Amino acid sequence: MRGTIALAALASASLALAPQAAAQAAACAGLSDPTEIVDCVDRIMRGDSSQGISTMEVVTENWDRAMEMQVWSLGTDHALVRILSPRKDAGTATLKAGTEIWNYLPRVDRTIKIPASLMSASWMGSHFTNDDLVKESRLIEDYEITLAYEGDRDGIDVWEFDLIPRPEAPVVWGRIAYQVRKSDTMPVWARYYDEDGELVRTMTFFDYRELGGRLVPAAMRVVPEDKPDEYTEFRYSDLEFDVELDEEFFSLRRLRDTR
Amino acid sequence: MSARGRIRLRLALRNLRRHKRRSLLSGSAMILAMALLVFSRTIAEGGHEDWIDGGVRMGNGHVAVEAPEYRTRRTLDHRLSPEARAAVKDALTSEVLTERLVASAPRLMIQGLASSSSGALPALIVGIDPEAERAFSALDEKLEDGRWLEPDDHLRAYVGARLAGRLKLKEGSRFVLTAQDAAGDITGQMVRVAGTFRSGIPEMDEGFLQIPLTTAQEWLGVPGASTSEALLLRNSRDVGPVRRDLAASLVDWGDEAAVIEWRESMPELNAAVRMDDWADYVFHIMLFVIAATAIINTILMSVMYRTREFGVLRALGLERGEVGRVVFIEGMILTAISGLVGMVLGAAVVWIFFRNGLDFSAIWDMEMEAAGVVIDPVIVPRFHWNQILQSLAFILVIGSLGSIYPAWRATRIDVAEAMKFEE
Amino acid sequence: MKRAWWKIGWRNLGRNRRRSLITAIGLALGYSAVVVMTGLSRGLVAEMIDNGTGMLTGQLQVFAEDYLPDRGIYDTLGGRDGIDVDALVAQVDGDPRVTAAAPRVYAGGLVSTGAATAAGVVLGVDPEREIHVSRLLSYIDEGRAPTPGQYEIAIGREMARQLDASPGDEVIVVAPGADGSLGNDLFIVSGIFGTTVTELDLGYAVAPIEVVQELVALPPERIHEIAARVDDPWAANDAATSLRIAIGPDGPAADVRPWTEFRPEMVEYANLATSMEWMLIVFVFGMAIWGVANTMLMSSFERRREFAVLLALGGGPGLIVRSVLAEALVLGAVALAGGVLMTLPVLVWWSTAPPDMSWVYGGFTMAGGLMRPILRVEWPTSMIFITAGAMFVTALLAALYPAWRSARVPPADTLAGR
């Protein structure tokens, strides 16, 4: 599970970056149990439903590209992402419904269900795989959470949590370290380690600002440790929360609807 | 035996004794031929059984029970229900089976994805019962690191070495298996590496792993089910009767359980073994022909320059036919003794020097794959009495055929001429 | 005794024609057996190499240095800038050992009818050149090869079965592009190939190279591989060495690999088969030696009076040894003539019209190569001579003991008939 948090940002996404500003922050701030705090942050990142516009910039040793996309989400199970630009990819859409992933290809006007054998392929050329999209779940379900550090880091008062996978949890990480600002419960970074304690990837949050009436980290960047020059970055330009969406919205018919 | 018969026998024996060197020479050719035949046939048979055995151990057993369409569909929809499995288990208790069965093992197979923090790769995931599998699979011997699965393992996996390498997994590493469960949902399962294996078959080393059966059943939501029950038999010759017996026992389960044998489940291995069989036949026929000329040659030799001796016999009052019979009996005795000695010698050589296997690894040090089976460079010879007796019978037939002509020649000897010719 | 040795030998053999004939037939059979078996075994090896390399890979490949093992879509020859494809293909083709060369692009992706989807490798080829390099396209038994420049695709039989697609049907091909985009387009199934190698029939699709480049956003000058056919597979190593030099450090950073490097198990099997040939010779002639020794012993025994006379007259033992050895040599020569007469027609027949063995066994793979169910024979040229040599050695070895015994015949006793 390449990053529950990451995912949040991705397809299931909008939610990702949707912390509920002040009110929520305050609610989280009142908590002291590490599990409760992380769950609270996790929850704010996932509002019930959302809709937004995001850019995804992917830099690899082989290409750089930026895409603009529109994202709808409902809970953790449903998400729809439609590419707006560049023109070559415009209209391409990905639907996540439960454990299935479907792609709509406007050029051929067809929808294709991604078979299990292609779950390991990269999603839209990013540092996330289709599998990452499917395996999203809540952090507290899969991890034991402890507070590893509390105090000042670079002049900011933070918590640092250690997330250790539960014995049978189907996650690949050996440990996740997660830093959260105390003042507004904004996530700062998440570092993903393998079982030997080697850092595998880092996700950083930044550009905290108000979108859709909430304070959110509008940008998030993932860097794979073995290729430090590569990254995938999401940046929200527009975000709305608690929009009117139901499960029927996330249908194959909607997937095809290029609008 | 009549008095004359006894005399003929004694004459023949005496002739053989008197010409020790000649008898020895003629005999040794046959002994050698027979010994070579025994040697080569046991090795060929052993190589074959090893091959089939290796194939069926890696694969689906000599005989397997599966849902009828599993072979082509390969999905969990076509699985053996716990009830069907119980019926199979019952069927295994029949007399035909208990005599021939070495081991039976349930397998739950699914194509899925193995992912670690360094990536995700497709893999064939097989749930096995370590207890049952121990007597069955040859995979536990291919261990490279760590250990094989044990009966009370729960979240453990035995992984192909190259798959483990590419996912940067080592003993104890956690990783996640993902596949579509019986309900159609994609589900994940965490397991840890118990050990890794290197089988020499690229597809297996790159994309095959075993987990405990119960773990697989739970994960995929098919409690008590399997995709196949594989049976390992004492000998590949037992496939026919076992298959018939099983099919008869499972006749009421026709919609759910079908019996298939290795020739169907491994058509490639079947073709390769048939070709090898065929090459063996050709080779043995050639060996037989060469042996036959050697034998006829020696017997003929031993008669042809004994003109004078036969002349004497005739002069002593033996009739033409009787001289022929003496020669014929001589040939038969020689062949029979040589054949037996050769057989014992060949068997003894094979037994003493090669019973633990004839090691070809000096000339082929790499793992050699054919028809999806890694060929073991150590061939353990197999004795099949009927085959060895066949060879013996063959030697006797050749010997007696080879004696007819010399015997006929012996009847044609002109007494006066023979006596005139001084040896 | 001024007569030529072979005349002496011939005369000696003539003393007992029947016996000589039987021995010679035995030896000739041995010769025949070894040569035919060797021919079959080499045919098997040639079939394996031929199909193992000729089906898809070719006998020689040129690709970017870091292309293997991951076969990344960006690891094209010449990197991001690509190469002058025609020039490099022409250069590879220019090697005298190379019969044909063809450029290729590999893309991993999906082939889908919408209702069903299969994952596989989409291979971009130049159909006109490819047909001279690999046989994959010639296995199309339904429909035809894709037309250059057209969005047409040939798929494997198993894949066709999974997709329930037949020639003329529309399929969607989806493949991640080299620029990170998700390449997708509609293709018409032009043909279906059935190689019986499951891996190919299930996981490969072939389309025109320029169309695949377009699909995965590679410009025309970027290709992954040049595959080449080398008719004599054992010349591939030399061809690779000279191509490495020819491309040189100034050319694109390319790795040239002959099949012996990417299919080492086939080389291993070929070596194994060669050592088996030697075992066969030892086996067969080890047995034949007894037959010859027997004949020679009998023959010299019969002639012991003659030898005794010779010795009594002052002839040296060397003369007798030579006489016996001459007989053995001539026996060998006769047997060789017979053996060649027996063997050649069989070899000519089998090598021109390999018997169909599909009634005994079907196709199967060996060391990753497909074996057709035919009795293929390769001319075991070297073995024809080596076996002939082995036969003479056998005859001579078998004659040594009889010759030695003959030279030590006690003249007085023998002449006295004791």
Image: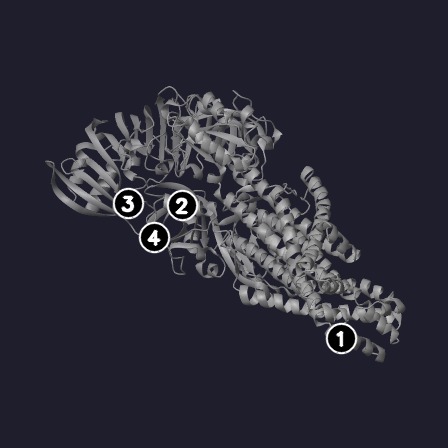
Do tags 4 and 3 sit on the same chain?
no
Asked if marks 2 and 1 touch (Cβ < 8 Å), the reply is: no
Which corner quadrant of the image does residue C346 belong to? top right
- Closer-to-camera residue (C327/B31): C327
Three-letter residue code for mark 2: Leu
Asked if marks 2 and 4 touch (Cβ < 8 Å), the reply is: no
Expressed as whole percent of the image width and height from the top left, the position of residue A110 reads 47, 26
Mark 1 residue element: helix
Q: State which tag comes first along the sequence, 4 or 1.
A: 1
Mark seen at residue B13: 1
**Any part of residue C125 in sight:** no
- Which residue position is annotated with label 2? B163
Three-letter residue code for mark 4: Glu
Q: CA distance from mark 2 to mark 1?
A: 71 Å
Q: State which tag comes first along the sequence, 2 or 1.
A: 1
Expressed as whole percent of the image width and height from the top left, the position of residue A92 reads 40, 25
Rendered position, C401 above or below C115: below
* Circle 3 Cα neighbour tier, 10 Å, few/some/many (<14 / 14–19 / ≥20): many
Expressed as whole percent of the image width and height from the top left, the position of residue A173 reads 29, 44
Rendered position, A81 above or below C315: above
Q: CA distance from mark 2 to mark 4?
A: 13 Å
Three-letter residue code for mark 3: Asp
Q: Chain of mark 4?
A: B
Three-letter residue code for mark 1: Leu
Asked if marks 3 and 2 touch (Cβ < 8 Å), the reply is: no
- Which residue position is annotated with label 4? B171
Mark seen at residue A194: 3
Mark seen at residue C289: none
Mark 2 residue element: helix
- Closer-to-camera residue (B131/C369): C369
